[in-house]
Image (cartoon, grey):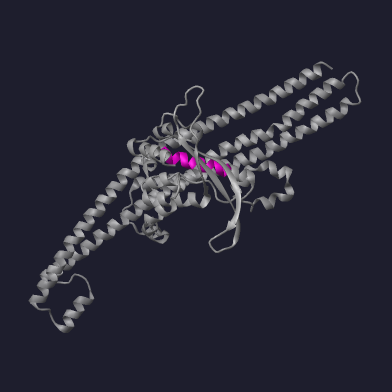
Amino acid sequence: SPPLYDHLFSCLSKENLIPCPHPSMVEKGTNLLRKMEINVVEAEKRTGKNTVNMQETYTVYLIETRPAETVPEGGTPATPDTLWRRYSEFELLRTYLLVTYPYIVIPPLPEKRVSDAYLEGKVKNLYKFKFVWHKLSADNLDPDFVERRRGGLENFLLRVASHSVLSNDEIFFHFLTEGWRERVLETGFQDKADSRLKSLSAMFRVKNPDKRFTALKHYCDELNTVISQLLRVRARVADRLYGVYKVHGNYGRVFSEWSAIEKEMGDGLQSAGHHMDTYAASIDDILEEEEHYADQLKEYLFYTDAVRSVCRKHELIQYELEMAAQDLTHKKQQKEELATGTVRVFSLKGMTSKLFGQESQEQRESRLAALEQSIQEGEEAVKEKNTECQEFVRTAWEDIERFKEQKDKDLREALISYAIMQISMCKKGIQVWSNAKECFNKM
C-alpha cells in the first residue's frame, strides 16, 4: 500500500545498513530491521496452468511486511501488507542481484527440489515409513520440506534486507510490494548476464590470476567438502540415535506387561515403563531441532558457490583486461613495423608486400594515422579495464571480508548451540534413568 511503500522507501534511501548474522541471531539494532519487519509466514499449495498451458501443482509463499514501530501499551500493531510469491520469483530476484552486484556475495536460496541431503535429514522416516522412502525423493510438495524451504526463503530476504548495498536496491523493494516483475525485466539484466561458457574460458585462459581470489576459490572447495562430510556424519549419527531412542520404547512395553503379573512390584514397573516411553518419544523433537542446525550448515554449503561466483567474475574482468592489453601490444608492434619497414614475424601482410611490392608513402601514412587512432583507443580501453578491475577487487574484497566475519560468527554460534543441545539431550537421558532408578527403589 502507498503508506507502507513511502515508509519503507524512506528507510531504504536514507540510511546505510550493517550486515546481520543468521536470522535466528538477527540483531534488532540493524537499521532496516529496526524500521521494517519481513516475514514469510506460510506456504500454500495451488494448482494452475503454466506457460505452456499445462496443469501443474506448485507452492506459493506469503510474504508479510510492516513498519517496525513501537506499539504503545494497549495499542494495536499496524496491519501488515501481504503478497504471495512463487519460488521461481525468488530465483529471478537472486539472478538479478547476481548480475547487478557481481562483487557481492549474494545470499543463497534454499533447495528447490528434495535432495539426497534433505532425505538424510529425514532419518526418522526411514524407520516409520520404509515403504514410501523412495516416493519422498521426488515429492517437492512434502509438508516438512516445504516448511523448511519457507524458513530458508525468509532467511534469504532477511540476509538481503540487512546488507548495506542490497537492501537499498529498488527492485528488491518492489519485490516486497506489488508489480515487481515488469520492473525487473525492464532493467535488461538478462542481457548483461555473463554466459557460463565465457566464464569458463576466462578461468582457463587468464594468465595472471589474483592469488587472493585463487586462494579463496580453493578455500571454498575445501569448506564445501568439510561441510558436506559434516552433514553426512550428522545424518548417520542421527540415524542410529533415532533407532536407539525408539528401541527404548520396548523397555516401556516390557515393563508394562511385567507389571500386570506383579503385585508388589507392579506400580514401580509401570512408572519405569512410562519414563521409557517418554524417553523414546522425545527423539522426534530432538531431530527436528537438529535439522534446524543442519539447515544453518547447509546454507554455508550453498554460500561457497556464491563466493565462487565473485571469483569467476573477477577472472572474467582480468581476462578482458589481459586481452585488451594484448591487443594494444599487437597494434603498437604493427605501428613499429610499418614505420621502420621491417616485419619481425611471418605474416600475410609481409608476403603480400613481397609479391605485389611495397605500398606507397601516402598509403603508409594513412595506415599509420589509422593505427595511431586505434592505439589511442586501445590505451583508453586498457585504462578503463584496469580501473574496472581495481574497483572490482576493492569492492569485492570489502564484501568478502564482511562475509568472512558473518560466516565465522554464524558457524561458531551454530556449533556452540548444537553442542549445548547435545549436552541437554544427554542430561535428559540421565534424568530418565535416574527416575527409573527411583521407581525400582520403591518396589
Query: Depth check: 61 or 79 in front?
Result: 79
Instruction: Residue 434: name its quadrant.
Output: top right
Q: Quadrant of residue 333?
A: bottom left
- At 14% from the left and 72% from the top, the residue drawn is 367
Q: Is residue 338 above or below residue 66?
A: below
Figure label count: 0
Q: Position of residue 38 (x, y in %)?
A: 48, 38
Toward the left, the furthest residue is 361
Residue 244 in view, yes or no: yes
Residue 169 in the figure: left or right of residue 144: left
Residue 26 position within the rendered picture, expressed as x and y whole percent measured from the top left: 47, 32
Which region is colored magenta? 148-162
- The answer to whether residue 199 is left or right of residue 344 is right
Residue ID at (57%, 39%): 294
Residue 163 visible somewhere in the drawing: no
Residue 260: x and y, percent? 89, 26
Residue at 40% of width from left, 60% of height from top?
195
In percent of the image, x 55 and y 59: which residue is there? 50
Residue 29: x and y, percent? 41, 29
**Of 134 and 186, which appears nearest the observer?**
186
Closer to us: 133 or 144: 144
Q: Is residue 67 left or right of residue 283?
A: left
Does the magenta-highlighted stretch encompass residue 106?
no
